[in-house]
Image (spheres, rainbow, N blue to C red):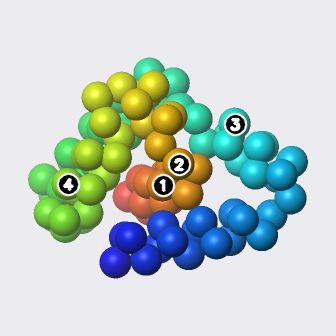
Amino acid sequence: MIETVILDMSKKLSALPKEKVDSLNDTCKVDSAEHFAYQTLQSKAFASGKLSLDNAQWLYATLGGSADIFNRRSLAIRIVAITMIAKLV
């Protein structure tokens, strides 16, 4: 399921002008504080039943161990992860 969403996002991004993609790329980078908050939100959402095991594991792996690791993910993956996190708030 998540792979399909990422593929769809990749297709949408490929249709955008380079300037828009560059802007989104900058917007979707996180700092250490945001990364920590995302990790905390992910674990609390799973513990409370708001996030399935599969989605929690995917989000945990996608966030990685640091903001730098997350920021090296593809833009499509970062958008999907950030959207998932936003829906948990």
Residue at horizontal 25 percent and vertical 46 percent from the top: 60
Q: Nearer the viewer, residue 7 or 20?
A: 7
Front-lying residue, 87 or 13 = 13
Q: Position of residue 30 (x, y in %)?
A: 53, 32
Structural distance between the alpha carbons of marks 1 and 4:
14 Å
Residue 47, horizontal then vertical, whole percent: 13, 53
Whether the residues at callouts 2 and 4 have beta carbons within 8 Å, the answer is no
Residue designated by label 1: 77
First-in-chain label (3 vs 1)? 3
- Looking at this view, is 29 or 18 the one in front? 18
Question: Can residue 45 be seen in this snapshot?
Answer: yes
Which of the image's four quarters has the N terminus?
bottom left
State yes or no: discs 2 and 1 in contact (Cβ < 8 Å). yes
Above or below for 30 versus 87: above
> Distance from label 3 to label 2 (Cα)?
12 Å
Which residue is located at x 31 percent, y 36 percent? 64
- The residue beneath circle 4 is 57
Q: Are marks 3 and 2 in contact (CB under 8 Å)?
A: no
Real-space Cα distance between discs 2 and 1?
A: 5 Å
Task: Determine if residue 33 is in view.
Answer: no
Q: Secondary structure at mark 4?
A: helix
Instruction: Give percent across and percent down for residue 59.
Output: 31, 52
Q: Which mark is residue 26?
A: 3
In the rendered structure, the answer to whether residue 28 lies left or right of residue 26 reads left
Neighbor class of circle 4 (other Cα within 10 Å; few <14, some 14-19, many 20+) is some
Tag 4 or tag 2, which sits nearer the N-term? 4
